[in-house]
Amino acid sequence: MIWHDVDDVMIITLPANFDMNANLGYLTREKNECLYEIENNIITKVIAIGEMQSLVQISVIDNQQMVVQFLNGSRPIEKREREKIATYIIEWFDLDNDLTPFYEMANTDPLLQIPAQKFYGLRVIGIPDLFEALCWGVLGQQINLAFAYSLKRQFVESFGDSIEWNGKKYWVFPPYERIAQLEPTDLAAIKMTVKKSEYIIGIARLMANGDLSKEQLKKMDFKEAEKSLIKIRGIGPWTANYVLMRCLRFQTAFPIDDVGLINSIKTLRNMNQKPTKEEILALSIPWQNWESYATFYLWRVLY
């Protein structure tokens, strides 16, 4: 993936099969998102990597170039630091993935054909930070999406940093090092269960101790990474596959028991009852190596 500096902005060359409107459609589906703001098709977000925090605005020209502008004097002087920001954005939008084979498969698949045409150019929007991805997976367990976003906002605004610009605060997800120091009682004001508080603090401590990291998981094959995540308290097969899909970019990740996936299949096939796991497995045979994309596109049918 090619990126370069032009004056004070970064330009990322976009791949074929990319459509910004399709991605903005996903990113704006929930009004209570607290980690970025979208106005006039421009994304404003703090990108935090280690100690570095840069407030950026991201816009797209003709679906060919992504323009990254630094606000508030937050442009890193060192090129290698800007490289990290480019890498984060490329990973966030999965820009180094050629979707041609996915569309070839989807256009002949009875279930994916309509979503693939309707949301053409959509990428699996990632969560590059492992701690954020795991927390979001835990927060989203067994509750509706709107309530999950409300919990995330409370958590972020209680424990995260922010950069103020033009009279607005732009939030950064709390770092695991900070959360590892807490006890479940410190999270009591947030309306999540005590169990979820324990899970999140437990994950933060594993990461702070060096027992869990994105680098370690990326060295594993899919099954090994899945097993390693499921061993962690509070992470079952759904959360593990969600994180493997959105953070670690395993294309075979497949949260097969996901309610949204089940409901989308039921809707698209006009079924009277929910499809069984066996039915979903049979339907997914053609999706081999693209299960994560198939799931993401099916989610978009209803969410």
Image: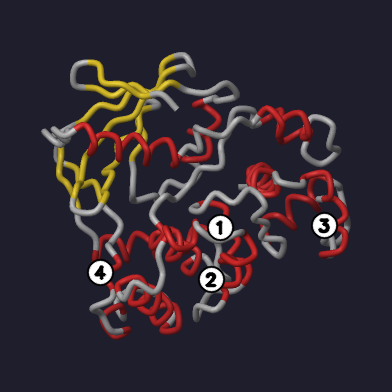
Quarter of the image containing the N terminus? top left
Tell me which label, 2 or 4, sits earlier in the chain. Answer: 4
Mark 2 crowd level (few <14, some 14–19, many ≥20, 10 Å Cα): many
Residue in the picture at 68% in, 30% down: 118
Helix, strand or loop at mark 1: helix
Q: Earlier in the sequence, mark 4 or mark 3?
A: 4
Cβ atoms at labels 3 and 1 below 8 Å apart: no
Residue behind mark 1: 244
Tell me the residue at 15%/39% (across/down): 165
> Which residue has dot 4 on it?
177
The amino acid type of the residue labelled 1 equals Leu
Residue 92 picture quarter: top left
Which mark is first along the chain, 3 or 2?
2
Q: Which mark is residue 280?
A: 3
Sequence-wise first label, 1 or 2: 2
Q: Callout 3: 10 Å neighbours few (<14), some, many (20+)?
A: some
